[in-house]
Image (spheres, rainbow, N blue to C red):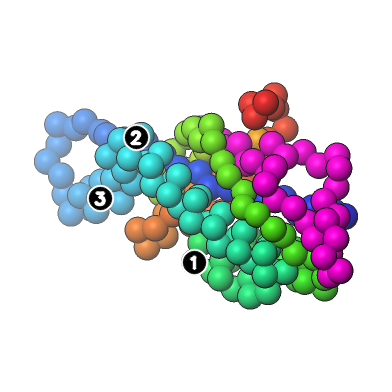
Amino acid sequence: MRVKPLIAIPLIALALAGCSTQQPTQETSTAAAQEQPLFSSDEEALAAAQAAYANYLEVSDQIARDGGANPERLKGLVSSQLFEEQKAGYLDVKSSGLLAQGSSHFDNFSIQSASADSISNYVCLRLSEIRVIDDLGTDVTPSGRNDNLPLELRWQAIGGKLVLEKSEVWTGQNFCL
């Protein structure tokens, strides 16, 4: 069975500040307003990203427990491109008659980078409590599955909300041991 990459959520903000002796004009005031940091501190950004990722995992796990049905529940939590990728994966799950039991968890959530409108982070996705069940009720979870996935996530701020834009398995040193 081929497992689609799981999504994860990143967060943090970088305080953008500029010093100038000029009086701000309407144009520079607008530009400065657009460069305001998403969060007032890294701690606030981290907390927001963790909450967004927890919400994403809860919805994603429920879709998997429902055998891939109604992946539209991810809309608003992920970008449109990521939604299409994940929707295709859930439709594959649905057509194969598989479903999941259990819930995934995460830890080691850390900030990689941030800007005024995006955040990237690292996270360890823990899958040991997720079992894959076929349409006969048999546990078909692959025995060699990696239950500890190091992920790199990228979030985009859209409408004052963090939306998961990218979730990829980190190919560097595994920090989820």
Amino acid beneath label 1? Gly
Q: In the image, which disc is placed on residue 33?
A: 3
State the SS at label 2: helix
Q: Disc 3 and disc 2: Cα gap in Å?
A: 22 Å
Please identify the quarter of the rendering in which residue 168 is found: top right
Above-or-below relation of 152 to 5: above
- Residue 123, percent from left and from top: 57, 37
State the SS at label 3: helix
Determine the main secondary structure of the stretch shown in magenta. Answer: loop
* Residue at (28% x, 45% y) in the render: 36
Above-or-below relation of 122 to 138: above
Q: In the image, which disc is placed on residue 76?
A: 1
What's drawn in magenta, residue-wise? 122-148
Q: Nearer the viewer, residue 103 or 51?
A: 103
Q: Disc 1 and disc 3: Cα gap in Å?
A: 25 Å
Q: How crowded is mark 3: few (under 14 residues within 10 Å), some or many (20 or more)?
A: few
Q: Mark 2 points at which residue?
A: 43
Disc nearer the start of the sequence (1/2): 2
* Residue at (86% x, 69% y) in the render: 136
In the rendered image, the quadrant that contains the C terminus is top right
- Residue 3, percent from left and from top: 79, 52
